[in-house]
Image: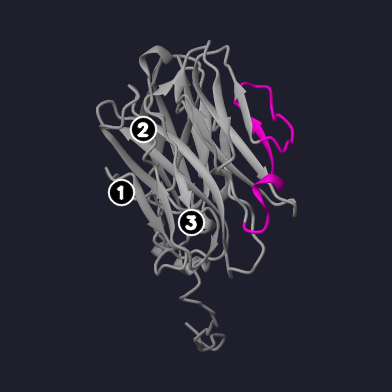
Amino acid sequence: MSFKNFFPLIILPLLVSCSHDFNNPLDPLNAGDNKPPNVKFTMFPSPGIVGQDVTFIADQTSDPESPKQELEVRWDFGRDGSWERDWNDWTSNREVTHKFMNTGSFWVVCEVRDPQQAVGRQEQTIVIQDAGSHIPPFAIFTVSPPTGDLNTDFNLNAGNSKNAAGGDTDLEYRWRFDDGQNWTAWDTNPSITVNYSATGLGLGPGLKKIALQVQETTTSEIALATVQLSAKALAVSQSNPTALFTVMPAQGSTSTQFNVNAGVSADQEDDISQLQVQWDFGNGKGWSGWSPNKQNSVTYAVTGIKTITLQVKDTHQDISIATVQVYVK
């Protein structure tokens, strides 16, 4: 055999330059280190009422790598893959409502996706009952002072909340000091103080939506109330009004007249007489229209939990909102 036509084989090393940012979670080389969100949601009222809004909140969800504001959420009411609320940003989809038109047990699925496309999931069965078997407590609270800045101690008091029988026993309270924040632990004390400059709260100046949940411990029924107030950067800066109102009585029947009064609302710059208000009584008739009259009333033709919403507008056209739920037997 002749080897004269063979040439020696020379192997040269191939050098490839690869740029890898170990601190960038979007770098595909880091994908193996990414963990999916830990999904956890709550609902109220619980059990839900047939034909009435049930609210689902994914606020207790967390992600090891990403802040909540970078997460996306979707919801499936029935676990049939229909995704009644498809992927949307955290602010839009972290809290949603849904009506169930039949009684019984239903699956609810919440999925949360992080920027690296990792998906976490929680499945939970919920119970929907007739309105007659579901009597919630009544949640309402005051804010003192009603306006302030980041250094103000806002005292929140839910002492006028009531149980289903109209008393003040067997109640627990928890608070959320703004959208996107975690709820406090359940507590039998109806009062709490929040200071928005407090270490660890992580909130800057602006309009805050304070939420209260009241739970009757003997039945696990929950009611909700919300108030918007403005925590300004400085005491001299302009702010939104604080929307507050009272409801009498806390529950009734289709023959009951519910009287509402927004005279306890306040504004840092304007007198109460300068504030305009309008109401949505949750009866399908929409907003009442702006008026300087702080008092109004409503009767309901249909039973169930009704959400009364107040808007308060100051002379700068700044608006704040408050909500309270009443029960119509």
Q: Residue at x 26, y 32 (%)?
A: 169
Residue 51 as seen in the image, left or right of residue 171: right
Amino acid at circle 3:
Lys
Indicate which disc residue 255 carries: none
Amino acid at circle 1:
Ala
Q: Which residue is mark 1?
A: 185
Closer mark to the observer between disc 2 and disc 1: 1
Residue 320 as seen in the image, left or right of residue 253: right
Indicate which disc residue 124 carries: 2
Residue 6 pos. (x, y %): 54, 85
Q: Quadrant of the C terminus?
A: top left
Q: Crowding near pointer 1: few (<14 within 10 Å), some, many (20+)? A: few
Q: Residue at x 40, y 70 (%)?
A: 199
Q: Nearer the viewer, residue 148 or 123?
A: 148
Residue 184 as seen in the image, left or right of residue 240: left
Question: Is 255 drawn above or below residue 212 in the view shown?
Answer: above
Question: In which quarter of the view is residue 139 placed?
Answer: top left
| Cα distance between the residues tagged 1 and 3 | 20 Å
Q: Nearer the viewer, residue 37 or 98?
A: 98
Range of residues picked out in magenta: 268-293
Q: Name the magenta segment's main secondary structure.
A: loop
Q: Residue at x 33, y 34 (%)?
A: 215
State if disc 2 and disc 3 touch (CB < 8 Å).
no
Q: Crowding near pointer 3: few (<14 within 10 Å), some, many (20+)? A: many
Q: Nearer the viewer, residue 210 or 169?
A: 169
Indicate which disc residue 68 carries: 3
Label 3: which secondary element: helix
Residue 291 pos. (x, y %): 73, 36
Label 2: which secondary element: strand
Amino acid at circle 2:
Gln
| Cα distance between the residues tagged 2 and 1 | 21 Å
Q: Is residue 287 magenta?
A: yes
